[in-house]
């Protein structure tokens, strides 16, 4: 299906939806019935805490969309609608991972925290020490699908951001298009990390830990009121880590601190400042190992060691300094109108120098060919989102109306250089310290991308059980690239895009909530083709049908969803020019997801998920047409259970475990090279008493050797080795 045809189809559906809404409205008005807002309104306490002070973790309070999750089962979210809405009344797939689940699984990265979530394949390239990789419904969401507190962390050209999960109150995964509210974003979905915020009650927590790969860390989380009148609140979260990476001779050190404070002059106004500063020092990210020797034995019958550093410790270096400074302002004018303004400036600077694997240098396949790579990008991202929300009844229907305008400016200074070749490396007896020529620059650019979006959304309570969601957005994007090496290649482009979403959900009294939703997306694409023409934004659309089930009296949430996604304007390698791409591709993803999050008994928590989809290239070159894109498994499932004894002599003692299954994927465009399926197991044992918590977590208990994926026959990536972490924490 062409992009223009998709847009025409989208517009037609919007027109039909408008006519359908009018048809629904007419008889309702004729009957002079009234639907209240009770099912969509936010309870007073939760609404007051929605954008500022939250109860301390463990304290009983009404849940808010930006506050802690009480246990494993979240009931509310704002990622899908930008309003504090019950998940059971949201007509789109969304999963929430709370801080308690992150702690129980001892997730060291955001990607690790996502492993038990349906529709998401994390750590696609193994345990990358630089950033988190994740696919949602078969499409990459790494570059433009990472959000923090509802604002995008746009990243490209190695100028990336990474968030330490210890600073997360909750991690929310929205599956399906989100462009109607967030602008340029992946069609598969996004990951929104909600930061820890100041607490209303005193909070004191310290933790020490360590384990495999010489890891040692210390973490702290402090918060509470800062004055006697209850107007000022603070929180200070931090984590310091010294560790080695999974490969030899590479560090994995991190220094993270996040101060925040909230000012509440009265019950109607909240102003919260959120900041964070982080430095990462690591290496060993340039593995890119051949298919022969990882997935299969090589010509000499050997497999490459998982701990081999394919770079060189004398030159291998990756450092990142990043900072985030922002605020959230909220004011309730009355029972109807609320205004919010969310602002953040994010900055990152990276130095990345390494040798990168480039196949074999000899017929026996015992010498790795390599090339040198160097980049030192700097990026600044300014984002602001203004929202006006009205909750009211027009006499017939209840409304949660949201109107907003947001602005994003991304500035990048990028330089990249390479050296071909550098001395090869023996996989049997690697010798490091070999010198090579200085890298030669091949890319020096300045880029500025600006985006303005105007959006509106209405959640309409047609009856006490039936809710209709309609939203639309108009974006204006400008993208200017100044090429300092070849000034004639400097380009600029301007685009505008309309995206929309329709949803319908019916909530039965027994807790069952079937729904249907349709949405479109767009995502600006950076770069130019062989004729120096800027790429167009990729477009997408999705139809999703599903159901959620939350039985009354049960602390559980079951979900199922079937979806059909088409993404167009996908970049496809140019068969006539290895240094450029063609924008003629389209990929279709059809699939099914199921999940369960439950507290089955006191102290017993369970998380389960299953994903199955088919991914095919429906427009492209003769090489990839009808094929499955490389590096993307189409089946995965997981189960995690954790139990803490609630009473008796062994009260506070607990244990847990999990299993992850990932199906096969392909290592080449022609789908002739297969990366096998794999299963890994996790385990945990812990003890809590009188504010103390001691735990031992093991990831990949059996130390299963597996390849996460291959992006080509010359670029495969080992998965996580067995990792043991012991920790002890004290809360008072």
Image (cartoon, grey):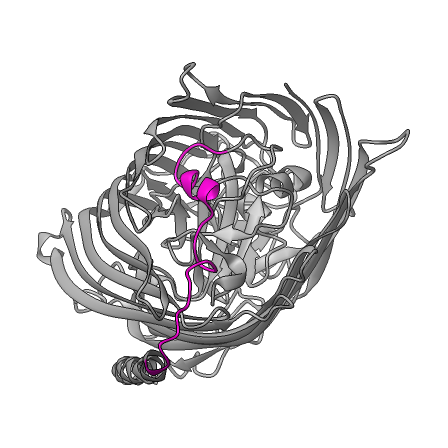
State whether the magenta stretch is mostly helix, strand or loop. Answer: loop
Q: Residue furthest left?
A: 488
Q: Quadrant of the C terminus?
A: top right
The residue nearer to you, when weighing 238 against 643, is 643
What segment carries the magenta color? 30-54
The residue nearer to you, when weighing 647 against 629, is 647
Residue 270, compared with residue 297, is above or below; it is above
The percent position of residue 150, horizontal first and vertical second, equals: 37, 48
The residue nearer to you, when weighing 48 against 727, is 48
Residue 104 forms part of the magenta stretch? no
Would residue 728 appear left or right of 74 to someone viewing this image? right
The percent position of residue 325, horizontal first and vertical second, equals: 31, 32
The reply to whether residue 296 is in sight is no
The percent position of residue 49, horizontal first and vertical second, equals: 44, 38
The percent position of residue 712, horizontal first and vertical second, equals: 50, 64
Residue 46 forms part of the magenta stretch? yes
Q: Quadrant of residue 139?
A: bottom left
Residue occupying image coordinates x 36% and y 54%? 144
Residue occupying image coordinates x 77% and y 44%? 602
């Amino acid at each position: 299906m062409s992009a223009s045809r998709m847009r025409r189809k989208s517009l037609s559906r919007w027109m039909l939806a408008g006519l359908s809404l009018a048809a629904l409205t007419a008889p309702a008005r004729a009957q002079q019935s009234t639907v209240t807002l009770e099912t969509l309104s936010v309870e007073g306490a939760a609404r007051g805490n929605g954008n500022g002070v939250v109860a301390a973790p463990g304290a009983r309070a009404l849940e808010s969309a930006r506050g802690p999750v009480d246990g494993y089962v979240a009931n509310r979210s704002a990622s899908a609608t930008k309003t504090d809405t019950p998940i059971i009344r949201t007509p789109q797939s969304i999963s929430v991972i709370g801080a308690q689940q992150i702690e129980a699984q001892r997730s060291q990265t955001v990607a690790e925290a996502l492993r038990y979530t349906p529709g998401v394949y994390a750590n696609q390239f193994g345990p990358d020490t630089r950033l988190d990789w994740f696919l949602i419904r078969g499409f990459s969401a790494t570059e433009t699908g990472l959000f923090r507190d509802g604002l995008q962390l746009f990243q490209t050209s190695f100028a990336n951001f990474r968030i330490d999960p210890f600073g997360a109150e909750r991690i929310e995964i929205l599956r399906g298009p989100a462009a109607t509210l967030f602008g340029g974003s992946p069609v598969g979905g996004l990951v929104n990390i909600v930061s820890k915020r100041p607490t209303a009650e005193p909070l004191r927590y310290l933790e020490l830990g360590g384990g495999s790969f010489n890891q040692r860390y210390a973490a702290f989380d402090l918060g509470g009121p800062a004055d006697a009148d209850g107007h000022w609140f603070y929180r200070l979260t931090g984590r310091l880590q010294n560790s080695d990476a999974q490969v030899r001779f590479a560090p994995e050190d991190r220094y993270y601190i996040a101060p925040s404070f909230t000012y509440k002059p009265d019950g109607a106004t909240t102003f919260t400042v959120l900041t964070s500063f982080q430095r990462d020092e690591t290496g060993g990210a340039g593995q890119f190992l051949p298919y022969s020797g990882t997935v299969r034995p090589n010509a000499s019958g050997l497999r490459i060691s998982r701990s081999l550093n394919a770079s060189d410790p004398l030159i291998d270096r990756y450092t990142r300094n990043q900072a985030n400074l922002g605020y959230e302002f909220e004011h309730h004018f009355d029972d109807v109108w609320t205004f919010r303004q969310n602002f953040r400036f994010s900055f990152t600077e990276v130095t990345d120098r390494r040798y990168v694997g480039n196949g074999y240098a000899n017929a026996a396949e015992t010498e790795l060919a390599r090339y040198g790579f160097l980049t030192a990008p700097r990026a600044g991202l300014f984002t602001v989102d203004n929202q006006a929300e009205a909750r009211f009844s027009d006499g017939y229907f209840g409304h949660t109306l949201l109107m907003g305008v947001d602005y994003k400016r991304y500035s990048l200074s990028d330089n990249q250089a390479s050296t071909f070749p550098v001395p090869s490396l023996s996989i049997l007896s690697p010798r490091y310290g070999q010198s090579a020529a200085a890298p030669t620059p091949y890319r020096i650019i300045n880029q500025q991308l600006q985006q303005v979006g105007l959006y509106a959304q209405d959640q309409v309570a047609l009856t006490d059980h039936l809710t209709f969601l309609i939203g639309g957005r108009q974006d204006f994007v400008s993208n200017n690239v100044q090429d300092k090496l070849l000034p004639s290649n400097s380009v600029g482009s301007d685009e505008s895009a309309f995206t929309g979403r329709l949803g319908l959900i019916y909530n039965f009294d027994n807790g069952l909530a079937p729904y249907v939703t349709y949405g479109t997306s767009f995502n600006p694409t950076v770069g130019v083709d062989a004729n120096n023409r800027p790429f167009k934004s990729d477009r997408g659309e999705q139809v999703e049908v599903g159901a959620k089930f939350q039985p009354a009296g049960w602390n559980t949430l079951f979900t199922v969803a079937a979806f059909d996604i088409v993404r167009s304007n996908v970049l496809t390698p140019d068969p006539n020019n290895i240094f450029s791409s063609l924008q003629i591709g389209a990929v279709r993803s059809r699939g099914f997801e199921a999940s369960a999050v439950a507290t089955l008994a006191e102290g017993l928590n369970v998380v389960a998920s299953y994903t199955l989809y088919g991914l095919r290239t429906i427009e492209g070159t003769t090489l990839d047409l009808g094929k499955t894109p490389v590096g993307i498994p189409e089946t995965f499932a997981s189960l995690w259970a954790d139990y803490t004894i609630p009473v008796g002599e062994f009260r506070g003692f607990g244990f847990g475990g999990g299993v992850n299954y990932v199906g096969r994927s392909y290592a080449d465009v022609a789908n002739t090279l297969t990366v096998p399926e794999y299963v890994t197991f996790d385990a945990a044992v812990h003890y809590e008493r009188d504010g103390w918590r001691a735990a031992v977590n093991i990831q990949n208990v059996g130390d299963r050797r597996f390849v996460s994926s291959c992006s080509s026959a010359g670029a495969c990536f080992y998965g996580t080795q067995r990792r043991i972490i012991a920790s002890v924490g004290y809360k008072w």
